[in-house]
Amino acid sequence: MTHSEENYLKVIYHLSVVSPRGVNTNAIAGMIESKASSVTDMVKKLAEKELVLYQKYQGVTLTEKGLLAAKMIVRKHRLWEVFLVEKLDFTWDEVHDVAEELEHIKSEKLINKLDAYLGFPTEDPHGDPIPNAKGEIKKIDKQLLSDLETGQKGICVGVKDSSSSFLQYLDKQQIALGSKIEIVGKETFDMSLTIIVEGKEMIISNKIANNLFVKLAP
């Protein structure tokens, strides 16, 4: 596959999480930043390679072959992110763009050796699951911080928004994967939260809370 075809597969894979019955071509165009007509042309090429199923007005779905291929691209991306953070001391807000380039490396042997070298990690630096060599993904039990009620506690296990600006904001607030967060207040007006993170009290907006994944803590 070309780099462009791989990028399309990855985008369709991510969009299919929220639209399992079929991904709208306009949604793909928005993610790829391309014209809808160009997306349709590419989707037809992917359909010819039996990577997707496409019916006009019904959206795009991945075939079994396409799903596995997409998972392998995601696997490479997330393994490289782990490598960049753990071995080269990149920060978690720096790795996405570099991993975007490295994910197109074709050598399966290299990726499997990288996986073994890193100790077979199951999550990337942002808390997203890493598919194994068979495409299997370990399910992570998580929910949005915004869904917790006053008095509940959670442990940060991931982010919904992995943009550099959001990750840098979290760094400033000293919120990271593994941080213990307790809800001590919720405003009914704007749903902002008063929280305690590792003993420090602060107020965060609903937008921030809606982009943090946590697992419930006792």
Image (cartoon, rainbow, N blue to C red):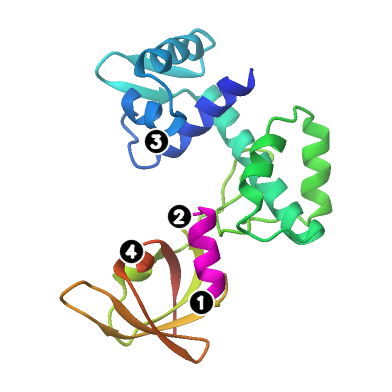
Looking at the image, can residue 140 be seen? no
Residue that numbered label 2 is attached to: 161
Label 4 close to label 1 by CB (< 8 Å): no
* Residue nearest the viewer, comparing 26 with 129: 26
Determine the CA span between mark 3 and mark 1.
32 Å
Which dot, 2 or 1, sits closer to the camera?
1
Which of the two marks, 4 or 3, is nearer to us in this view? Answer: 4
Q: Earlier in the sequence, mark 4 or mark 1?
A: 1
Picture residue at 50% right of the left edge, 92% below the top? 199
Magenta region: 162-172
Q: Residue 14, percent across and down?
A: 45, 39
Name the foreground residue: 195 vs 141: 195
Q: Amino acid at mark 3?
A: Ser
* Residue 114 visible in image: yes
Q: Are marks 4 and 2 in contact (CB under 8 Å)?
A: no
- Secondary element under disc 2, as helix, strand or loop, is loop
Query: Tag on residue 207?
Result: 4
Number of numbered discs overlaid on the protein picture: 4
Mark positioned earlier in the residue sequence (4 or 3): 3
Residue 40 or 75: which is nearer the viewer? 40
User: In screen coordinates, is 153 left or right of 169?
Assistant: left
> Badge 3 is on which residue?
16
Q: CA distance from mark 2 to mark 1?
A: 16 Å
Q: Quadrant of the C terminus?
A: bottom left
